[in-house]
């Protein structure tokens, strides 16, 4: 891959896009989806190819490059970073599918994008060499810009099954309807609309078992042999929906600093920069950002070292990493809330630099993967010698 851009170059491209995305943020919010120009800019920068297989023009970079680019985009526009995170990570998951599925999506156009809704609400009926799928799914971010979709559903199992058979179903655009119901107060630009499927056929090879992703033994590993494709599915996916929060906190901190350095109280003429509370919230935000980045970088680095050596990642480690990811948005929300509160009444206005970060961080917090309650209980139980009960690791 002689034309493969370096990690530094890709992250720099994302950083360079951030000011453009910030200018487009009002338009993005008004559209309730990303502008076509934003998707085109990210395509031109090669950002959707960061973890795509080299066989299809991808760069097969370490996931840390992907997450760093996502954070950079979020400093400019959280909605853009959210869509990037959940759409670009699908190039990595598609690499885990059987090769025929990859050829169906990328065989004629390697820039084709895939959206998703993993909630297992679909009705599945076995059919010859596949299944019939029906249902309505919510929260499919970026769906307007994608020609395929991943949908979650449980397959029927027999009496001898060792557990439920949860799968991702890969469905082409001709077989589903997008329902334009995304009217929200947060992450408005993500276009996370509902998807309806009415009794369509999905061949077996266009499904991916969650159990295969958990065991790190996927059909796609036969053709995509780079170490990153031996990472657990859950570990990569949960980071794709928590990482935007880090960029939101960075963007909010920079916006707060720019205002606070020049702000003078209208009532008493006091300089905001000299106020103890102003100084404290900045210090807290910086420390929170530094801590979370260091922990997540350490975790992904440890996992990559394991798979590069051909070793398994211990369940105990995966349980801890899952909890670390789940608490990122909680911690970032606390820090952004403190910045917002310290900004006074002006921050309530929609055009205030902090308002979008404040609204969007709460939208990110609402995602089920960003709720630390169950991961914390599971981690505590495993530490006490009980069995792991979370298989989305």
Image (tube, helix red, strand yellow):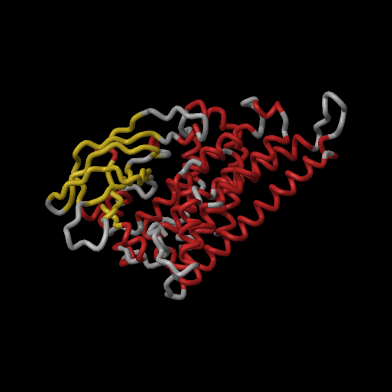
Residue at the spot x=29%, y=53% of the render?
A: 166
Q: Position of residue 64 (x, y in %)?
A: 53, 58
Residue at the spot x=63%, y=32% of the render?
A: 355
Q: Is residue 152 above or below residue 62?
A: above
Residue at the extreme right: 269
Q: Position of residue 196 (x, y in %)?
A: 28, 35
Q: Is residue 194 left or right of residue 190?
A: left
The answer to whether residue 174 of the structure is visible from this angle is no
Residue at the spot x=32%, y=43% of the render?
A: 148
Residue at the spot x=27%, y=59% of the render?
A: 98
Q: Position of residue 136 (x, y in %)?
A: 29, 36
- The image quadrant where one finds the C terminus is bottom left
The answer to whether residue 88 of the structure is visible from this angle is yes
Q: Is residue 349 left or right of residue 63?
A: right
Q: Nearer the viewer, residue 357 or 335?
A: 335
Q: Is residue 244 above or below residue 179?
A: below
Q: Is residue 173 above or below residue 352?
A: below
Residue at the extreme left: 128
Q: How many marks?
A: 0
Q: Position of residue 120 (x, y in %)?
A: 31, 46
């Amino acid at each position: 891959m002689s034309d493969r851009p370096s990690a530094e170059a890709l992250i720099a491209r994302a950083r360079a896009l951030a000011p453009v995305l910030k200018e487009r943020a009002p338009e993005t919010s008004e559209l309730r989806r990303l502008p076509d120009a934003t998707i085109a800019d990210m395509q031109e920068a090669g950002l959707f190819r960061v973890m795509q297989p080299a066989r299809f023009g991808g760069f097969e970079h370490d996931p840390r490059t992907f997450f760093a680019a996502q954070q950079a985009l979020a400093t400019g526009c959280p909605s853009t970073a959210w869509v990037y995170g959940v759409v670009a990570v699908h190039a990595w998951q598609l690499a885990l599918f059987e090769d025929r599925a990859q050829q169906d999506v990328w065989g004629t156009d390697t820039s084709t994008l895939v959206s998703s809704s993993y909630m297992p609400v679909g009705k599945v009926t076995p059919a010859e060499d596949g299944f019939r799928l029906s249902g309505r799914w919510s929260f499919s971010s970026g769906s307007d810009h994608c020609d395929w979709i991943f949908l979650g559903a449980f397959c029927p199992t027999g009496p001898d099954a060792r557990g439920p058979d949860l799968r991702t179903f890969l469905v082409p655009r001709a077989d589903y309807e997008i329902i334009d119901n995304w009217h929200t107060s947060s992450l408005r630009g993500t276009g996370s609309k509902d998807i309806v499927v009415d009794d369509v056929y999905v061949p077996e090879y266009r499904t991916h078992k969650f159990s295969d992703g958990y065991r790190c033994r996927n059909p796609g590993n036969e053709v995509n042999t780079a170490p990153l494709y031996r990472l657990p599915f859950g570990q990569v996916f949960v980071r794709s929906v928590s990482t935007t929060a880090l960029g939101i906190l960075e963007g909010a901190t920079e916006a707060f600093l720019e205002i606070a350095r020049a702000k003078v109280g209208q009532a008493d003429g006091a300089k905001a920069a000299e106020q103890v509370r102003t100084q404290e919230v900045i210090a807290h935000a910086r420390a929170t950002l530094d801590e979370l980045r260091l922990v997540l970088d350490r975790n992904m680095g440890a996992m990559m070292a394991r798979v590069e050596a051909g070793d398994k990642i211990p369940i105990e480690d995966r349980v801890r990493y899952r909890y670390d990811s789940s608490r990122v948005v909680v911690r970032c929300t606390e820090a952004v809330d403190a910045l917002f509160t310290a900004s006074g009444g002006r921050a309530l206005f929609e055009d205030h630099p902090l308002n979008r970060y404040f609204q969007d961080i709460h939208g990110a917090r609402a995602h089920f993967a960003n709720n630390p309650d169950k991961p914390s209980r599971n981690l505590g139980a495993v530490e006490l010698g009980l069995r792991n009960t979370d298989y989305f690791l």
